[in-house]
Structure formats: C-alpha cells, structure tokens
C-alpha cells in the first residue's frame, strides 16, 4: 500500500493549531503585523498551491523574493547566451525553463533554436557531459545557473570531465549565492527613506539551499539586522511552523537563526558538498535581475580550471543591455511589487506568452500567482 510520508505535514487539524499559535504570537507584536520574505522558488509554489496565503492571519504579509534561479538571471546574461548560441561549433546545454527567458528585444534561446542554433535541453549537468562525449568536435557549454543547491553537482561534473578527458566540455558559470542577496535586500530597504527601517521583518530561509549551507552563513541576519531567519520545509505545516517561530522571535525581541526543518537540514549543512564547491569555485561579483551587481554573490571557476570556463574559451562578456520594456520582474523579486500590480500581468504577460522571467519559470512568483491565486 502506497502512503504519502508527508501527509501528516498537511493535516488540517495540525495546521489549524499552528495558525492559532501564529495568531497568538502576532497579538504580542507591536501593530500585530509581520512581513516575511521567502527566497526559494519551491516555497513560492508551495505557499500558493496549498492555499496558505488565503489562510494566513490578516497581519501576515508574504513577499516572494529572489529565490527562482531563472528569474534572477540578468538581461545581460541572456544576451551572452544568445551570443554563444550564434557561434559555429558550439552546442549549448541548458535546463528547459531557461529556454524561454526573454533577452534583448524579447529574443530568447527558443528563438535562437528555431533559427538553427544548436541548443539541447538537459535534466542535469551529467547529461551535458554525455552530450560532449557524443560530439567530440564541438564545444559543449553548460549554462550553469542556480544557487548553492545545484552548484555542487556542477563541480562534480567538472571533476568527471577531467577524469574522462572530455576537453570539449565547459561551463558558463552564473551560479548565485543566497546570503549576499539577503544582505543586499536589507541594505536597500534600510537606505530607502520611503520604507520602514527594515522593510522585511523576517526571512523564511530556503530548505534546499540550507541542506548545503547549514545555519552559520545566515548568522549576520539576527546579529547585524535584528531579523529572524528560519529554515523551513515545503509542506503546509512546515511553513506554518516556520512562521510561528518568526512571529515568536519578533514578539520576544529575540531574533535568531533557527532550523525548523531538521528532518532534511543539518545545522552544519553538507561539508563535503561545500568542500567540492571550494575546490572548483571562488566567490565573484554577480548580476541579479532587479537588484544589480552584488559583491561576492556569484561563483567563478578558479584559475586552475580556466580551460573549463566558457567565458574565457569563447571570449564572452556580459554586455550593457536595456531592461525589458514594461517588465516589473525586478521589483517583484525585491518584494516591492505584487505580481498583479505590474500593468502587463495577465494581459500582455501570461505563461503562454511571457514578457518577463517571473512568468516563464514554474517557480516564478508571477507564474504561481497566475496559476493559483487568480483561480482562488
């Protein structure tokens, strides 16, 4: 008999008890309000799909931050993809949702593919390595996007490429790191005179990323910004428990980093995965859609592996490009705008015909809002 091992985490009675606990904690917060931000595409979808937004107490405001890898990919990075796609002897390997992200002039990799560019959809970096083995006379470039969760798999693939002597395999590293983005968001909200001293009251930390990082990299949030930070799982009870812990910290004036997802996340994270990252990558400045350049928020290949760096091998740089006309994805990712407040949302911009990446990716907040909130 097949049973869902997570069914208990969606138990209505348990969720009602957690909602009551949340309301009790909110009552003790001055103003009775809490604005929290999640920075994980899976959290975005889970909150919408489960209907939690409609159940949360009136004083709880949900902001969806820069937690979708495709969504934070910058226009300049898409322009670089298109540049490489036009090169002879180059095969791009990419995850499918990146294919439709619009770049300069609204052009995407899907358009380039239709015009003859050699672009292959893969489901893991190892698929890209197999592509390199099958096409020894071509240069295979894996478009390496994503956060700390996916970067170790790319490092492992690079190790295998060396072991198999596949010299035609390289990556275009656009990995991004979550903690520096959280700092940038808080610094922005504090410097904005139109906002409260800290526009984000608490962070729902990403469960997947935290399996790698553990808790220590988030310690600056309560220490420097007095902001609660709670690692949460993805089932309704997981999310509600994390919100309860946040609200209780705000009520008690005792912000901390707390692991509310211990069945999957260890406080120390995954040291072996981090060691692999450290071996192949080093921190670098990175561009984030809507935020701009954040110091040391990306991962660049170390000089010892420069032969695997597509930017060096193909002499590719990130050009200056204008933003997509009318698209407000950047403001959505910063928590400054709810998707329906964008004038294009549900009109010119839909999942069938997306203008911006937040509507392209299934983890994007615009796509989630369109799919779940509008039909609620």
Image: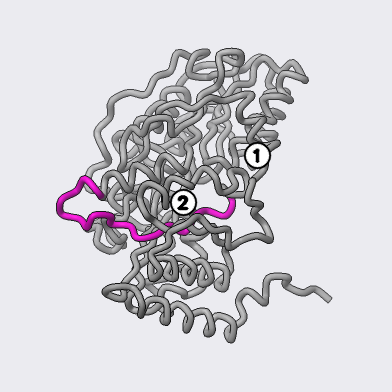
Identify the residue shown where x is 22% and y is 58%: 196
Residue 11 position within the rendered picture, expressed as x and y whole percent measured from the top left = 62, 81
Residue 355 position within the rendered picture, expressed as x and y whole percent measured from the top left = 33, 48
Task: Give the SS element for disc 1.
Answer: loop
Q: Is residue 83 above or below residue 146?
A: above
Q: Is residue 246 visible?
A: yes
> Tag 2: Cα neighbours inside 10 Å, few (<14), some, or many (≥20)?
many
Identify the residue shown where x is 47% and y is 43%: 178
Q: Is residue 228 above or below residue 99?
A: below
Q: How is the image coloured?
A: one colour
Identify residue for label 2: 361
> Tag 1: Cα neighbours inside 10 Å, few (<14), some, or many (≥20)?
some
Q: Quadrant of the N terminus?
A: bottom right
Task: Give the SS element for disc 2.
Answer: loop
Extreme residue in the right direction: 1
Identify the residue shown where x is 67% and y is 14%: 167
Extreme residue in the left direction: 194
Q: Which mark identifies residue 23? A: none
- Label 1 vs label 2: CA separation? 17 Å
Q: Is residue 134 visible?
A: no
Residue 118 position within the rendered picture, expressed as x and y whole percent measured from the top left = 55, 28
Q: Report which quarter residue 202 is drawn in.
A: bottom left
Number of labelled discs? 2
Instruction: Pick the residue in front: 34 or 79.
Output: 34
Identify the residue shown where x is 31% and y is 55%: 335
First to last magenta residue range: 190-208
Residue 78 position within the rendered picture, expressed as x and y whole percent measured from the top left = 40, 33
Q: Quadrant of the C terminus?
A: bottom left
Sequence-earlier tag: 1 or 2: 1
Identify residue for label 1: 124
Left or right: where 368 falls relative to 144: left
Residue 339 forms part of the magenta stretch: no
């Amino acid at each position: 008999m097949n049973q869902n091992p997570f069914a208990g985490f969606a138990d209505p009675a348990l969720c009602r008890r957690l909602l009551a606990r949340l309301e009790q904690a909110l009552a003790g917060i001055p103003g009775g309000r809490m604005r929290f931000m999640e920075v994980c595409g899976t959290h975005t979808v889970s909150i919408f799909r489960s209907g939690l937004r409609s159940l949360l107490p009136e004083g709880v405001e949900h902001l969806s931050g820069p937690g979708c890898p495709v969504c934070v990919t910058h226009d300049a990075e898409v322009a670089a993809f298109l540049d490489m796609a036009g090169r002879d002897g180059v095969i791009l390997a990419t995850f499918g949702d990146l294919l439709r992200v619009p770049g300069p002039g609204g052009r995407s990799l899907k358009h380039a593919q239709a015009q003859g560019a050699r672009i292959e959809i893969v489901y893991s970096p190892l698929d890209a390595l197999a592509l390199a083995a099958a096409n020894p006379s071509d240069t295979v470039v894996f478009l390496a996007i994503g956060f700390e969760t996916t970067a170790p798999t790319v490092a492992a693939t690079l190790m295998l490429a060396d072991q198999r002597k596949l010299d035609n395999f390289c990556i275009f590293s656009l990995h991004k790191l979550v903690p520096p983005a959280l700092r940038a968001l808080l610094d922005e909200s504090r410097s904005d005179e139109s906002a409260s001293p800290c526009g984000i009251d608490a962070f729902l930390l990403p469960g997947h990323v935290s399996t790698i990082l553990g808790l220590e990299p988030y310690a600056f949030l309560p220490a420097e910004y007095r902001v609660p930070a709670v690692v949460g799982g993805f089932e309704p009870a997981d999310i509600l428990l994390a919100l309860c812990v946040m609200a209780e910290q705000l009520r008690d004036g005792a912000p901390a980093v707390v692991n509310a997802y211990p069945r999957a996340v260890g406080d120390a994270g995954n040291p072996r995965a981090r060691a692999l990252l450290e071996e192949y990558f080093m921190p670098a400045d990175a561009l984030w859609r809507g935020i701009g350049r954040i110091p040391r928020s990306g991962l660049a290949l170390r000089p010892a592996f420069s032969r695997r760096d597509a930017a060096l091998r193909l002499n590719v740089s990130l050009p200056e490009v204008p933003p997509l006309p009318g698209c407000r994805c950047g403001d959505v990712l910063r928590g400054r705008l709810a998707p329906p407040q964008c004038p294009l949302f549900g009109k010119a911009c839909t999942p069938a015909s997306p203008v911006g990446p937040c509507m392209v990716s299934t983890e994007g907040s615009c796509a989630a809002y369109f799919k779940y909130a509008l039909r609620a």
